[in-house]
Structure formats: C-alpha cells, structure tokens
Image (spheres, rainbow, N blue to C red):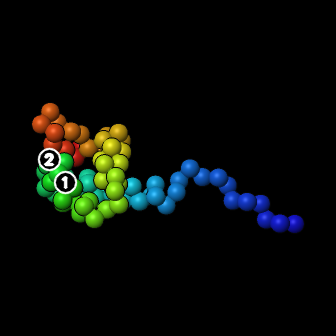
Amino acid sequence: MPMPPPKATTESPRDRQVFHEMGQIVRALEQQGPQPLDDVSRLVGAPYWEGGRFDRAVSFAVADGLVVQDADGRLHAV
C-alpha cells in the first residue's frame, strides 16, 4: 500500500525566510535605535535582497507589533 501524501501546510520556505528578515530589521533597530526606513534598509543589506522582500518584511514586522513607525516615518523596535 502506498504512503499517504504529506499533510498540507501553509508555511513555505519563503515564509520562513521572511521571519529571518523581520528579525534582522528588529535587531538593527534594537542596536542602532530609531531609524528612517531608508537607513534600516541599508543597515540590513536590503538592496541585495530580492525585489519587494524588504517592504514585505517591514509590513509583517509592523503588523506583528515588533516595529512601529512614528509620525516622522522612523521605525522603532518595540
């Protein structure tokens, strides 16, 4: 009798990667303090990331409450 297929999952390797990227953003903000978005991008090396990855990671970090953006547009680690 053949083996049953693996259980479906909503997580993909790409999803795991975004958690790593979110962690990089949070660590950069913890070490360097509040930063403008462009500076955070430079600190984590986002210009070398695949297109759209940085914006996606920032969006998830904000949505998860790990990062907040102030009125001046600077990001803060929570």
Residue 3 on image: x %, y %? 79, 65
Amino acid type for the residue under numbered disc 2: Pro
Q: Against 50, is 29 above or below? A: above
- Furthest residue to the top? 71
> Residue at the spot x=53%, y=53% of the render?
11
Answer with left or right where residue 6 lies relative to residue 58. right
Residue 28 shows up from this direction:
no
Answer with left or right where residue 41 lies relative to residue 49. left
Residue 61 on image: x %, y %? 32, 46
Q: Secondary structure at mark 2?
A: strand
Residue 9 shows up from this direction:
yes
> Residue at the spot x=21%, y=55% of the render?
41
Please rate how many residues cluster around mark 2, counting C-alpha atoms within 10 Å: few if below 14, some from 14 to 19, many from 20. Answer: some
- The dot on residue 1 is none
Q: Secondary structure at mark 1?
A: helix
Q: Against 8, is 3 above or below? A: below
> Residue at the spot x=22%, y=46% of the render?
77
Residue 75 on image: x %, y %? 19, 44
Residue 27 on image: x %, y %? 24, 57
- Furthest residue to the front? 51
Q: Quadrant of the N terminus?
A: bottom right
Amino acid type for the residue under numbered disc 1: Val
69 vs 46, nearest the viewer: 46
Please rate how many residues cluster around mark 1, counting C-alpha atoms within 10 Å: few if below 14, some from 14 to 19, many from 20. Answer: many
Q: Which residue is mark 2?
A: 36
- Dividing the picture into quadrants, the one containing residue 43 is bottom left
Q: Which residue is mark 1?
A: 40
Answer with left or right where residue 25 lies relative to residue 11. left
Marks 2 and 1 sit apart, C-alpha to C-alpha, by 6 Å
Query: Mark 2 touching mark 1, by CB under 8 A?
Result: yes
> Residue at the spot x=19%, y=54% of the render?
40
Q: Quadrant of the C terminus?
A: top left
